Image (tube, rainbow, N blue to C red):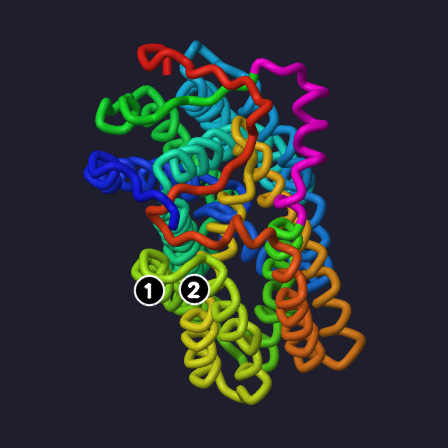
Amino acid sequence: MARQPADAAEVRRLPILLYMAGMMLLVGFGSPAGGLIDVPVTFFLKNKLHLEAHEVANFRLAAAIPLYVGLIFGFARDRWNILGRKDRGMLMVFGAVCAAVYAGFAAASPSYPVLMAAILVSLVAWSFTRAAEQGLASMAGQQLAMTGWMSVVWSVCASVPYLAAYGAGGLLSQFLEGQRADAAARILFLVGAGLMAAVALYGAWKPRVVYDHLKLEHSKARPLDELSRLARHWPVYPALLVWFLWSFAPGSGTPLQYYLQNTLHASDAQWGAWNAIFAAAFIPTYFLYGALCRRFTARTLLFWGTIVGIPQFVPLYFVHSVHGAMWGAAFIGLTGGVASSAFIDLLMRSAPRALQGTIMMMAGSLYWVAIRFGDVLGTYLYDYAGGFTACVVAITLAYALILPVLLLVPKRLIATRDGETLPIEDAALEVEALAVQRA
C-alpha cells in the first residue's frame, strides 16, 4: 500500500491549485495559437482574405512551427534560472517580451505575411512562459502527490480560454467585419499585449503559501547527460504516444468548420457557439475525474476513460442540422473529459525529476503536430476522399489505437490513486533544491 502524504500537504492543496490556475489562465488567454488571438485570426483569413479550407489549414500549419519544437523551450526551462527566480523569472522576462511583440505588430498593416510573422515571433516568446507554467505545475503535482487534481486544474484552465475565445470569437469576428482590416488587427494584438503584460506581473508575485512548500528542482548534470537520461526514461514513450493519438483527430478543426458553415449553413456566431459548447461540456467530467482519482487508481481511469472517449465524434455522422450539431458538441465534451484528464495525469507521472518542463513541452509539441497535421489530413479527406464522414471514421480509429498503447505503460506508474506517493525513480540524479528566497 502506498504511503499517504502528510496532513500538511492536504492543507496546502487548494492554495497551490488556485495559484497554478491563475497562472495557467493568463498564459492560456495570451496564447497566439489557442487563446483570444487565434479564433479571430482564423476568421480574418477566411472572411477578409477569402482563403479556402486547405489554405487556412496550411497557414495554421506553418504558423505553428515554434510549437513543434517545444522540447527546446522545455529544456531551457529545466536548465535556466533567470533572475535567480527559476519559473517566475521566465514568466516575468518572456511575458514582457511577448507583450512588446504584440504591441509592435498592432501598429503594422495586416496582410498574410504580417499575420504569419506576428504569430511566429510571438509564439517563440510565449512558449518560454508556457514552459515555465507547465514545468512548475508538473513538478508541484509530483512532489505533493496530486497529479490527478493538477491535471483537472490544467484541463479546466485549458478549456476556459478556448471556451471564451469561441464563445466570443464568432461575435468578435462579426464585429470586426464592420471594421477596417488594420483596425481589426490592432484590436487583436493590443488585447494580446495586455494579457501577456499581466503574465509578467503574475511572475513577480511569490505567495509563501505556495513556494514555502515546494522544492524547486535543478539538475547539476551536463546538458548532454540530461538528454541521455531523458532518452533512457521508458515511461515517457507510451505516455507521449497516447497523447499524440488523442490529439490527432483529423477533421475536428478546419473541415468541421467548413462542414458546419458551408454544408449546414451555420453562421460565424453559431460556429463559435459550437466550440463553446464543446469546451464547456468537458468541464463537468474534468471535475468528475477529480472525484474519481482519489478513489480509483490511474490505471482504472485510463482504461475506462479511453473506452468512453473512443466514439466521441460518431454522433456527427448522423447530424444534418445546426441544432443537431450543437447536441453533438455536448456529447463529445461529456465523453472526453475523463480521458483527457487521465492522459495529462499520465504525462505528469511519467516525467523524470528536473525534466518536467521538457516532457510537458514535448507533449505540447506533439499536440500541435497532431492538431495541425491532423487538420491537413482532415481537409484532404474532406475535400477529396469522402467528405466529413471519412473524417469521423479517421478520428474514431485514431482513438481506438490508444487501448493497445496503454498496455505499454509501466504498471507501477499507474497503480496509485491521487494522494498516494508516486513511484518516481531517479536515484542516480543529483538535484539541488534552489533557495526559497531566490525561487
- The residue closer to the viewer here, 392 or 188, is 392
Earlier sequence position, callout 1 versus callout 2: 1
Residue 401 is drawn in which quadrant? bottom right
Where 137 sits versus 338, above or below?
above
Magenta region's main secondary structure?
helix
Residue 359 is drawn in which quadrant? top right
Cα–Cα span, label 1 and label 2: 8 Å
- The residue closer to the viewer here, 285 or 51, is 285
Where 247 sits versus 278, above or below?
above
* Position in image of residue 326 (x %, y %): 43, 78
Range drawn in magenta: 220-237
Is mark 1 in CB contact (under 8 Å) with mark 2?
Answer: yes
For the view shown, which residue lies furthest in the right direction?
Answer: 384
Residue type pointed to by label 2: Gly
Q: Which quarter of the figure is the C terminus placed in?
A: top left
**Secondary structure of the residue carrying numbered label 1:** helix
Relative to residue 71, is residue 282 drawn left or right? Answer: left
Residue 430 is drawn in which quadrant? top right
Q: Which residue is mark 1?
A: 288
**Secondary structure of the residue carrying numbered label 2:** helix
Where 194 sits versus 235, above or below?
above
Q: Which residue is mark 2?
A: 337
Res. 114 visible in picture? no
The residue that appears at 52% across and 32% down in the rendered structure is 131
Q: Is residue 267 magenta?
A: no
Residue type pointed to by label 1: Leu
Q: Is residue 231 magenta?
A: yes
Res. 349 visible in picture? yes
* Position in image of residue 321 (x %, y %): 50, 86
